[in-house]
Image (cartoon, rainbow, N blue to C red):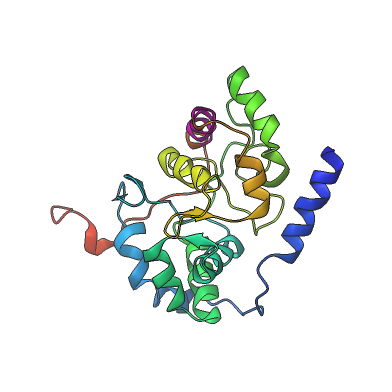
Amino acid sequence: MKYLLSLLILSAAALGPMRVAQAQDAKEGEKKVAMCIGCHGIAGYQASFPEIHKVPMISGQNAKYIVNSLVAYKKGERKHPTMRAIAASLSDKDMADIAAFYEQHGKEAGVTVPATPPAPPAQVAELLKKGNCASCHGENMNKPIDPGYPKLAGQHADYLFVALKAYQIDNNPQVGRSNAIMVGMARPFTRAELKLMADYIGSLPGDLKTVPESRFRSASR
């Protein structure tokens, strides 16, 4: 069964969104993030839809995953009115450039994340094993097996919880996510179990961060 699941996961990674590959230009991407920085460029910024939670950290995230996410919002596979409107305004080249910018945004030379994360509590370890999370996101949740999958370590736990719950939602025109692999992973868990996993993953050291934009920093700095 695990072998079959691994084949399905690898097949999904290979297929990904059916988009024409675009050359990435991080410098061009920096010119195109005006719609992003108002949420993702403010440390601790909270969204109120579909519930109050911190917006995800995207600096340091895999570029391929960022593109996949934007495509999913544009196609309605991820339901979020604001993100769908933003994604719909972007061309494939825009997405590639923005993703390239955020992948390298805030990286510091010589700074590395510990290869071995803190061990989870026994209950959480069983839940992660049941969800087969490491098969995509890596044992440390920071080195996915394919850059089309996200780094999760250190991501805001409340955002992870909201995202995981979205895979359990059906027939809601405003909320939900339809990725087949993640739907299959999330459905067997209770909300309490999803929160336990989100809290642990959010506590791990990782590459993700929010890099505050200078225009949003305190004037006293």
Figure check: 141 above or below 83? above
Q: Is residue 195 left or right of residue 147?
A: left
Give the residue at the far front of this rendering.
Answer: 171
What's the residue at 45%, 72% (across, down)?
87
Which residue is nearer to you in this view: 111 or 170? Answer: 170
Figure check: 70 above or below 171? below
What's the residue at 65%, 58% (across, down)?
147
Q: Quadrant of the N terminus?
A: top right
What's the residue at 49%, 47% (across, down)?
163
Which residue is nearer to you in this view: 113 or 174? Answer: 174
Q: Is residue 10 left or right of residue 86?
A: right
Q: Position of residue 81 (x, y in %)?
A: 38, 64
Specify the segment rendered in magenta. Answer: 192-201
Asked if the magenta segment contains residue 31, the reply would be no
Q: Position of residue 89 (x, y in %)?
A: 42, 79
Give the residue at the far top of this rendering.
Answer: 122
Q: Position of residue 136 (x, y in %)?
A: 69, 46
Q: Is residue 62 left or right of residue 84?
A: right
Q: Position of residue 202 (x, y in %)?
A: 48, 37
Q: Is residue 77 left or right of residue 39?
A: right
Report which quarter residue 84 is drawn in: bottom left
Asked if the magenta segment contains residue 200, the reply would be yes
Total label count?
Answer: 0
Helix, strand or loop: magenta stretch: helix
